[in-house]
Amino acid sequence: MAQPPDQPPQQGGFGAPQDRPQPPAGQTPPQGGFAAPQQPPQPPQPPQGPPAPPSPQPGYGYPQQPGPYAPPQQPGPYGQPGPYGGQPVPYGQQPGPYAQPSGPYGPQPGYGYPQQQPQFPGAPGTPQGGGRNPFKGRPALVVGAAVAALLVIGGTVFAVTKGDDKGGKKPVAGPSDDGKATASDAPVNPGDGSGDGGGDDDQDFNAGRKAGEAKVLWYKEAPDAPASGADAPGMWITAKAAVKAAYKELVAYNVGDGRPTWAAITLPQKICAVTPQKTADDKVVVAYMSGTSDRAKCNQLQQIDLNTGAKGWTGVVADGALFDSAISVELSLSGNTLMVGRSQSGTAYDVRTGKKLYDKQKYGDACFPTAFAGGTRLIAVASCDASDPTEHDEIQELDPATGKVRWTQKFTKGWSVAKTYSVDPLVVYSTDEDKKSWNITVFKPDGSLRSQVRVDESFAPKCEGGFLQRNLTGCAGVASDAGTLYLPTETKSGPNEIVAIDLSTGKEKWRVKSPTDEAMLPVKTEGGRLVAYVEPSFEGPGRVVGIPTAGSAHTPKMLMQLPKSTADIENSFFSRDIDWVGGRFYISTTRLTGNDDTKEKLMLAYGQ
């Protein structure tokens, strides 16, 4: 693909690609995406997959590559001098509008998965509320109405059945009751074959297992949920336990046989947020609602030990300034720092003790932190000058222990930071809703530009998002290592592909087709290979494959052929989380629909 001339940008900040005319009639560009809901009863989300870049616009994070519909454009705004000197011209933006996406982190249409309604073209995955703070510049009455509407969603009683063991004050931390789960919190079925039965979990999934098929280690069902549905966020795998949150409970199963590792923990109200990450010693923090009324907030914090089920410290998240409420929060872990993000600020705690460390508040004239991403680094995104012609996003890296800003980069007006595909290395997906465009930018450790993706492709990672806040880390189906980003292409007809992109140049290194006609999604990198999940079809189960990342041969090699006995169950996770840990493969739901017609699935574990 031809590249734009190497000229300095004409104006503006960090990350805007050049505009490009819309594709000729009859051609459908790819879909990109923020994050979309997983399944009903949640609202639909935007499309997935990126198209080709548009014409010149300044900005940080906007590609300027020429596309099939227009000649190369002048280099873009991502070349203006900044704190680290001039920035190179950004690449990778794709215009829209695109066709309707196949859905967020979950199965593609075609085998029983509800299709997503696009909200704006040109974004990977499918977001729930777009990238910008939906309340920016809106009166309090509108904010209140939106909040009230959101709060009526969700809430269901959760329980787990037997598994198959055959094969506004200041945040204050304090001790929880006795720090231990009680016997009364035990799952309905203990997972040792002595449950009350009556469901799929009574089947012997390993009877008649064929040579080469993986063993079903255990399977868990969820009981009926209210029609309004319930969230089932988080899935954490330790050396001992697979832990899952659902509605008001956390349940833990032995990774090998599915027996309860500890008695289930029941919280006073529904769980509304969790840390996607866990600490080095296997601790997490969950947030639950303060009550059931329309005024209830997601402000109650509880630390949990994943290996023992012991409850640690508790805390209450204080509200921020006007319109900066803890009605909805997002939790991130970075080292020993827990960052609790509200709609316009954040508060950091020592995850070991619950002690408040610092606040990340409004800075400059009008920059409000609206989202955080944790992991080996702590990343913050702010929306600035909401009611001003200079409205824009900024991204920062913070010192997790002190909150000190290590660097700041400004995005061009109109561009919104939607997702972080990786925090180390930092790979940021941004969108311009008005221009129906997207861009993927890679940053160096000092915050300067490393590259921008220059691949004209319809990528389709599976992303989740939030209505009141951004969810920077809610993407599956994407993986990276120090030098390469791995993204799945959109599935239209026939097999999709995984594209390996060089993080230093933004160019394609290689690509590989799915070994079946179903979508293949990156899961993680380990031991010199990319682990990928090949989705099931109506006719058969999925599989886990390993793809060599080095050398010239990138043929997928079978790591685990999932059994036909659970193909229907595997295929019916409308909203799912997946993981590959220690040679075992796990699938769990992230949403309970409240469907009364059939029992809902909670979790499946496979091994050899």
Image (cartoon, rainbow, N blue to C red):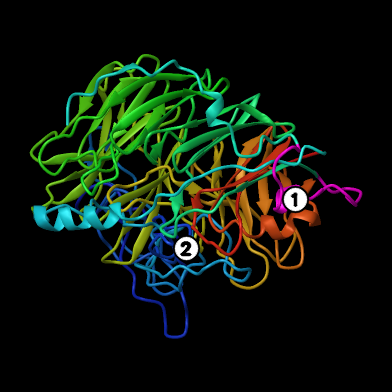
Q: Residue 23 in the image: x percent, y percent?
A: 41, 77
Q: Helix, strand or loop at disc 1?
A: loop
Disc 2 crowd, CA 10 A, few/some/many (<14, 14-19, 20+)? few
Q: With 564 as the anchor, is 533 left or right in this view?
A: left
Is 195 inside the magenta-drawn segment? yes
Residue 564: image quadrant is bottom right
Q: Quadrant of the C terminus?
A: top right
Residue plotted at (56% across, 66% down):
113
Q: CA distance from mark 2 to mark 1?
A: 30 Å
The answer to whether residue 394 of the structure is visible from this angle is yes
* Left or right, 22 with reference to 534: left
**Quadrant location of residue 449?**
top left
Work out whether residue 236 or residue 62 is closer to the camera in this orientation and state it.
236
The x, y position of residue 96, in whole percent, is: 38, 70
Segment tinted magenta in the rendering: 193-214
Q: Disc 2 designates what residue?
A: 2
Residue 65 falls inside the magenta stretch: no
Instruction: From the top left corner, tell me how far across and down residue 49 is, in percent.
Output: 47, 62
Q: Please state which of residues 457 and 532 is positioned toward the viewer in this rendering.
A: 532
Amino acid at the residue labelled 2: Ala
* Front-lying residue, 69 or 460: 460
Q: Which residue is mark 1?
A: 556
Label 2 element class: loop
Do tag 2 and tag 1 residues touch (Cβ < 8 Å)? no
Q: Is any part of residue 400 visible from this angle? A: no
Kindly identify the amino acid type of the residue bearing the numbered disc 1: Pro
